[in-house]
Image (tube, rainbow, N blue to C red):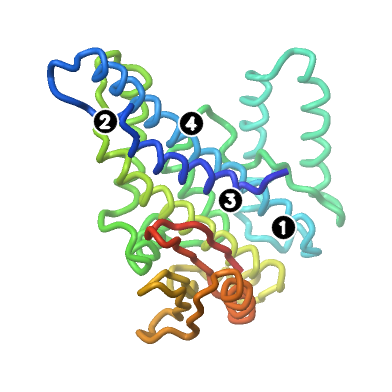
């Protein structure tokens, strides 16, 4: 099964290609038929692009919850908010999931999920993959913030904005970018005369990557604290923030691939062949517990890896 990140990158890079084609571009006023089709296509892109980000938030959260389940750390030693989310708070998510499933699936589904919730009272527990972001149809900005707070991350949207700024992806606070995307999706889906500007969709490409990378980086860092049984995090409830995240980047500059360590202006390594430089940079980022971010030769994000 493809990873949440792999599916997300594929969707957003396809979105970037889609907004440049003639079919979605407005022409002269007398090209009424073309312009009507282009308007409808742009509205469709606004809906599916936001759905791609929502899907990433859900599935990446589920992946990392599986990681926590296999950490070997006793459930009672996890952050209290996470324990609550994985037990009684998860019931509302299961209730909603029951309402949207076929009748013949419901019994097996609730039995499996109830077993996972009950397992948190044992040493060999498995947290339900639907503990986060599955209690309603859409993922709000409050839901994203709540997920990160469960893992002792303070002021989540401010931290993600700080990371986005350091990667030079966006200028506006990411919570506003997300709220704008919610409104754009809602209008495109429910207002017949909606006309989503091409520029808004293009800007969303950067915003979506910024939100996804920031969310993943912070959540992965928190899970790594759990996996290492970090007492300052688990016992003392140390808060995590953007300063706990360091970046290692690969960018295409002057016909060469260059590896940069955050805070240094000179390239750490240079190579004409990305296939040689990338695995080495990934290894170095893993050793240093940094977030690896890669741009392609067109200046678009093509990959990232959190450690």
Q: Earlier in the sequence, mark 1 or mark 4?
A: 1
Disc on res. 5: 3
Q: Secondary structure at mark 3?
A: helix
Residue 207 position within the rendered picture, expressed as x and y whole percent measured from the top left: 36, 50
Q: Position of residue 45 (x, y in %)?
A: 39, 30
Q: Nearer the viewer, mark 2 or mark 1?
A: 2
The residues tagged by marks 3 and 2 sit, at their Cα atoms, a distance apart of 29 Å
> Can residue 57 be seen by looking at this rendering?
no
Instruction: Check disc 2: other Cα within 10 Å, few if <14, some if 14-19, many if 20+.
Output: some
Q: Quadrant of the N terminus?
A: top right
Quadrant in the picture for residue 223: bottom right
- Residue named by callout 4: 138
Q: Earlier in the sequence, mark 1 or mark 3?
A: 3
Residue assigned mark 2: 25
Which comes sooner in the sequence, label 2 or label 1? 2
Asked if labels 4 and 1 touch by Cβ distance under 8 angstroms, the answer is no
| Nearest the eye: 121 or 280 | 280
Q: CA distance from mark 1 to mark 4?
A: 25 Å
Q: Residue at x 14, y 23 (%)?
A: 28
Camera-side mark, 3 or 2: 2
| Residue 54, image x, y percentages | 50, 39
Mark-to-mark CA distance, 3 and 4: 19 Å
Residue drawn where x is 54% and y is 70% of the image: 274
- Is residue 3 in sight in this rendering? yes
Q: Which residue is mark 1?
A: 68
């Amino acid at each position: 099964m493809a990873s949440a990140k792999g599916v997300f990158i594929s969707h957003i890079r396809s979105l970037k290609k889609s907004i440049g084609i003639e079919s979605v571009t407005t022409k002269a006023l007398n090209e009424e038929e073309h312009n009507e089709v282009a308007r409808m296509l742009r509205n469709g892109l606004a809906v599916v692009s936001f759905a791609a980000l929502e899907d990433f938030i859900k599935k990446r959260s589920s992946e990392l919850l599986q990681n926590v389940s296999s950490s070997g750390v006793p459930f009672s030693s996890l952050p209290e908010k996470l324990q609550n989310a994985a037990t009684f708070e998860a019931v509302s998510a299961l209730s909603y999931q029951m309402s949207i499933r076929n009748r013949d699936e419901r019994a097996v589904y609730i039995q499996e999920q109830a077993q996972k919730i009950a397992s948190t009272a044992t040493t060999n527990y498995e947290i339900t993959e639907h503990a986060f972001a599955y209690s309603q149809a859409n993922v709000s900005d409050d839901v994203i913030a709540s997920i990160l707070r469960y893992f002792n991350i303070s002021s989540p949207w401010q931290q993600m904005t700080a990371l986005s700024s350091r990667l030079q992806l966006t200028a506006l606070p990411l919570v506003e970018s997300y709220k704008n995307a919610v409104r754009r999706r809602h209008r495109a889906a429910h207002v017949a005369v909606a006309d989503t500007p091409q520029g808004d969709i293009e800007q969303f490409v950067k915003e979506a990557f910024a939100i996804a990378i920031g969310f993943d980086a912070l959540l992965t860092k928190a899970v790594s604290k759990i996996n290492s049984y970090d007492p300052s995090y688990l016992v003392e409830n140390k808060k995590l923030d953007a300063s706990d995240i360091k970046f290692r980047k690969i960018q295409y500059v002057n016909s060469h691939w260059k590896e940069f360590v955050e805070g240094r202006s000179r390239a750490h390594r240079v190579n004409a062949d990305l296939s040689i430089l990338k695995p080495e940079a990934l290894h170095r980022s893993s050793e240093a517990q940094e977030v690896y971010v890669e741009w392609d030769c067109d200046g678009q994000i093509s990959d990232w890896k959190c450690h």
